[in-house]
Structure formats: structure tokens, C-alpha cells
Image: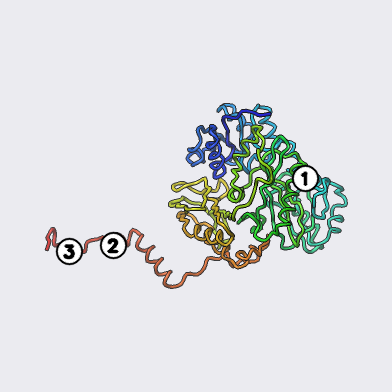
């Protein structure tokens, strides 16, 4: 059944809102956006055909207010809502509220979000369909024996909140004598972050790699994968660099892991764009979770496949079939994405704030910038401090790494500290260049976070430039000496 979509409301902000509106415009649809007052003068709001201001006790609370956003869609005449990522993107109740209001939710069915949003239910579903999962102990199965069953899995263990995401509440246990203490900490963090203290424990793969597979499904039962992304360069379970394809995954294992991902999506009756994530190590892989939304790192898949994922989301949400099969998709070249943040790597990656006095992104063939801010704007403490995503595409991984480094070197941002220098050091690291990466690599290289000490000549040049830009020095240099001023208007 097809449904006519003429106007799409974007229930998000920043770079993903700009990204969605770009595809909405390309499709010839009307773009509507909701925004808190702090976002009133942002590129996404100016780009939309219509803008509706929303409010809340905090800016984040406004974007989490489902009833207010549904009301904004109805008032603006929007017949579809795209949630982007984060906020309400994986909220099944919000998807149901859209359906009840006669609004198309651009995402999977609410029951699919429910299934995959709970890590325990998702894991049990995947295991029951014969797909690989890591040995584990689930608290819900028998809370009284959870500690005993977790200990039986053996060390090292990874403790996770059942309702978790984004690395929150995860604990690695290498000493089983500390198991009960770490379980209690994980439970407290799960309750604090998600309002749910239920846990499960699974075997932790040492020096694992994080492989995720992009999938697309339509309401007619068609499902394809768009190959894998390597997301192993992480800090505290948060992705820093993503690339497609994986630099070291053999062709046979690529085919196997991608088909398993597509099989999981088929089993779930998946409709829309989603990502199946795996832990990979020593030739074996295990299901980690499924994200029922567009991912932050989706651009690298777009670059190597030529598929506009947001445009596909819009078509599928309208009831159209994919119109192509697995054999029609192929990988072309290599793409890398880095997340440019306002943060100080030398001070423990603490977020920074400030005005974007100068922001000049790089440009050129194979360089893409996805950003929700611009020169004259500001980075505030209200939201995540991501300034932009830099995506590069080249014929090979080595060329892509070189292009990313050159693009970062050309990226000018003044007004707040950024992680650009750190990203350049990371991309030039010998292990990263060789593809010898795993989720713990960044933690093993703390020296990369420190800013290099400038040589004396460079330091003198920087100090001279700083001095020449200060008002006192400029006024002194421009002042007319008293003796010359006494001459008056005399000219030689």
C-alpha cells in the first residue's frame, strides 16, 4: 500500500536535520522543521520551507516531547515525520503516536523498534533464528542466579544494561572477584541513564573489532544489505572514525557477515534503513545490537555505494518497493568519516564551547562536509559538541587516509578548541594506517591525545603573530612619535 507524502517534518536538529532536508528537497517535497529557541538561527531552520518553534524545560526536553512534535506536524500540514538519529528516533511510542495521528513515521514499525530496542529481547530473537550470539547470562531469565550464571561464562565479561545504548553503563570485568561490585555499578548506571537497572553479561572478546552492516527493507518483503562499515576506532565505546569497507575483512567473511545481517532484518520483517552491529575477532563474529534508524556514520556507505539512504527511507516510507536487488549493489573505492568535535583532547577530551569566529571547511573532489553550524554561530553546552562530519572518498584506503589528513589540515575553525589535531595524529598512526585496529586501540595510545610541543622557531612566530594582533602593540606601532608630530603638516 502506497501513501502519498508531500511534506516531511524533521524532528531533529543540527547536521542530521540539514542532511535530511537535503534529500527532502531533492525529492521535491516540502521540508518542515521543529526547533527550540536556541536553534532559531541555524542552517537547518533557514533551510526548511516551514519552521515551528517548540519549547521544553531544557532544549533537549523540547526535542523529546513527542506530543508537541506530533501537534506541530498536524498544524504545519506535514504528512510524515523523519526523526533522524537520537532523540525520538527509536521510541516505539512516538512511532505509534504518529500512526494514530495519521502521520507517516519514517522508520520501521513500532513493534520492530520494541523488539530491537531491548538488548535482551533482540539477542533472544536473533539466537532463536539461528544467528550467532556471544555466550552470555541474562538477568531476566532468573534474577536469583544471575551472578552465578555470569561467573560461569568466565572472564573477561562485559556487563551491559538491557535497555542501554551508546556505551552507557557498560563494565568490563577481568577479575571475577570484582563481579558483584561491577554488577552493582552497572545496575546503578543503567537505572540512571535509562530508568532500567536490568542487566545481562556476555563474553568479552579481547581486542575486538566493531563491524556494522547497513540494511534496507521495504514493505513488500525485499531486504538488501549495503555492505559493512568498520567502526573499531572508539573512545569509551563512542565512535571516533568510521570507514567503508572494512580494511581487513576477507571477502568470504564479508559475504558471511553481511548475509547474516540481511537475514536478521528479514526475520524481523524490517522496513526502512537500519544497522546490524557485530563484535568480530579471530575469524568469528557475534550479534551486538540493531539500530532501527539512520546512523551518524551513514555517509561512508553512501559514498561507496552511490545510494542516498535518506532518499530510500522516504521512498520506502511511502510504500514504494526498493526496485533493485542485492546483485545491483557494489562497493566502489573507500570512504572515511571523522567527527570534528569542540573538545580538548589534551585535557581528557573535555567538551569546549565558544563562538565560531571563523569556520572555513575544506572542499574539493571526494570531500564532503555534513554540518549543522556555520561561521558566526556558536557551540554551546546545550547539545552534543559535534561541529561537523568530514567524509572523504577515494579509490583506495591509503588515498582516503591521505585525503582525510589533508582535508583536516585545511579545516579552519577559530573560537573554540577542536579535536582536529588529534584526528590527524590518529589517522597517521602506523597501526591505523596498516588497518591493525580494534576497539581498544585508542585507549592504548594516550600519547596521541597530547598536543605536540612546538619547536622554538614556530613558538616565536606564533607569539609574534599574537603580539601583533593585540590592541596595545598595534596602537603603539601606528602612533606618530612626539618629535614627528611637532613638525605639523610639513612634507619633504
Residue, disc 3 = 484
C-beta proximity under 8 Å, tags 1 and 3: no
Q: Earlier in the sequence, mark 2 or mark 3?
A: 2
The number of numbered discs placed on residues in the rendered structure image is: 3
Vertical side of 373 occupied by 490: above or below: below
- What is the x, y in percent for residue 46? 48, 38
Residue topped by disc 2: 476
**Image-quadrant location for residue 461:** bottom left
In percent of width and height, residue 301 lies at: 62, 49
| Residue highlighted by disc 1 | 122
Residue at the location (25% across, 60% down)?
479
Pair 2/1: label in front: 1
Task: Tell us which disc is closer to us: 1 or 3.
Answer: 1
C-alpha gap between disc 1 and disc 3? 83 Å
Q: Residues within 10 Å of mark 3 (few under 14, many from 20)?
A: few
Q: Quadrant of the N terminus?
A: top right
Say what secondary structure mark 3 lies in.
helix
CA separation, marks 2 and 1? 70 Å
Of mark 1 and mark 3, the one earlier in the sequence is 1
Q: Quick one: label 2, few (<14), some, or many (20+) residues within 10 Å?
A: few
Q: Is residue 350 left or right of residue 197?
A: left
Q: Residue furthest front?
A: 327
Residue 112, quarter of the rendered image: top right
Quarter containing the C terminus: bottom left
Label 1 secondary element: helix
* N-term mark: 2 or 1: 1
Q: Residue at x 76, y 45 (%)?
A: 264
Q: Residues within 10 Å of mark 1 (few under 14, many from 20)?
A: many
Amino acid at each position: 500500500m502506497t501513501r502519498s507524502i508531500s511534506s516531511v517534518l524533521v524532528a531533529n536538529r543540527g547536521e542530521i536535520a540539514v542532511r535530511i532536508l537535503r534529500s527532502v528537497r531533492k525529492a521535491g517535497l516540502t521540508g518542515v522543521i521543529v526547533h527550540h529557541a536556541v536553534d532559531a538561527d541555524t542552517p537547518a531552520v533557514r533551510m526548511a520551507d516551514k519552521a515551528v518553534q517548540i519549547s521544553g524545560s531544557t532544549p533537549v526536553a523540547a526535542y523529546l516531547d513527542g506530543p508537541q512534535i506530533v501537534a506541530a506536524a498536524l498544524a504545519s500540514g506535514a504528512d510524515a515525520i523523519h526523526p533522524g538519529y537520537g532523540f525520538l528516533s527509536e521510541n516505539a511510542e512516538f512511532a505509534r503516536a504518529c500512526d494514530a495521528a495519521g502521520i507517516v513515521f519514517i522508520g520501521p514499525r513500532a513493534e520492530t523498534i520494541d523488539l530491537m530496542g531491548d538488548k535482551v529481547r533482540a539477542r533472544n530473537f536473533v539466537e532463536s533464528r539461528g544467528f550467532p550470539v556471544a555466550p552470555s547470562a541474562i538477568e531476566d531469565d532468573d534474577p536469583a542466579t544471575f551472578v552465578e550464571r555470569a561467573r560461569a561464562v568466565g572472564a573477561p565479561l562485559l556487563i551491559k544494561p538491557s535497555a542501554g545504548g551508546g556505551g552507557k553503563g557498560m563494565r568490563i570485568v577481568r577479575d571475577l572477584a570484582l563481579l558483584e561490585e561491577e554488577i552493582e555499578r552497572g545496575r546503578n548506571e543503567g537505572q540512571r541513564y535509562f530508568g532500567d537497572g536490568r542487566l545481562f553479561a556476555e563474553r568479552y572478546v579481547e581486542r575486538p573489532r566493531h563491524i556494522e552492516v547497513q540494511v534496507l527493507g521495504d514493505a513488500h518483503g525485499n531486504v538488501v544489505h549495503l555492505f559493512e562499515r568498520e567502526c573499531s576506532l572508539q573512545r569509551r565505546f563512542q565512535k571516533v572514525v568510521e570507514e567503508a569497507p572494512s580494511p581487513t575483512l576477507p571477502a568470504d567473511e564479508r559475504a558471511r557477515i553481511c548475509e547474516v545481517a540481511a537475514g536478521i532484518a528479514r526475520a524481523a520483517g524490517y522496513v526502512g534503513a537500519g544497522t546490524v552491529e557485530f563484535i568480530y575477532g579471530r575469524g568469528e563474529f557475534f550479534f551486538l545490537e540493531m539500530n532501527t534508524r539512520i546512523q551518524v556514520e551513514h555517509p561512508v556507505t553512501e559514498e561507496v555505494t552511490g545510494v542516498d539512504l535518506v532518499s530510500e527511507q522516504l521512498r520506502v516510507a511511502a510504500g514504494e518497493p526498493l526496485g533493485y536487488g542485492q546483485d545491483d549493489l557494489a562497493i566502489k573505492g573507500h570512504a572515511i568519516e571523522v567527527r570534528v568535535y569542540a573538545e580538548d583532547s589534551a585535557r581528557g577530551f573535555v567538551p569546549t564551547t565558544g563562538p565560531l569566529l571563523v569556520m572555513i571547511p575544506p572542499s574539493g573532489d571526494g570531500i564532503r562536509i555534513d554540518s549543522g553550524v556555520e561561521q558566526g554561530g556558536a557551540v554551546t553546552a546545550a547539545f552534543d559538541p559535534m561541529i561537523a562530519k568530514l567524509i572523504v572518498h577515494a579509490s583506495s584506503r591509503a588515498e582516503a587516509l591521505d585525503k582525510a589528513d589533508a582535508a583536516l589540515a585545511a579545516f579552519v575553525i577559530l573560537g573554540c578548541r577542536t579535536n582536529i589535531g588529534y584526528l590527524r595524529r590518529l589517522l597517521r598512526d602506523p597501526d591505523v594506517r596498516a588497518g591493525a585496529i580494534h576497539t581498544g586501540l585508542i585507549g592504548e595510545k594516550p600519547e596521541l591525545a597530547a598536543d605536540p610541543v612546538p619547536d622554538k622557531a614556530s613558538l616565536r612566530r606564533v607569539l609574534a603573530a599574537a603580539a601583533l594582533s593585540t590592541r596595545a602593540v598595534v596602537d603603539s606601532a601606528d602612533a606618530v612619535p612626539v618629535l614627528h608630530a611637532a613638525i605639523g603638516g610639513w612634507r619633504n
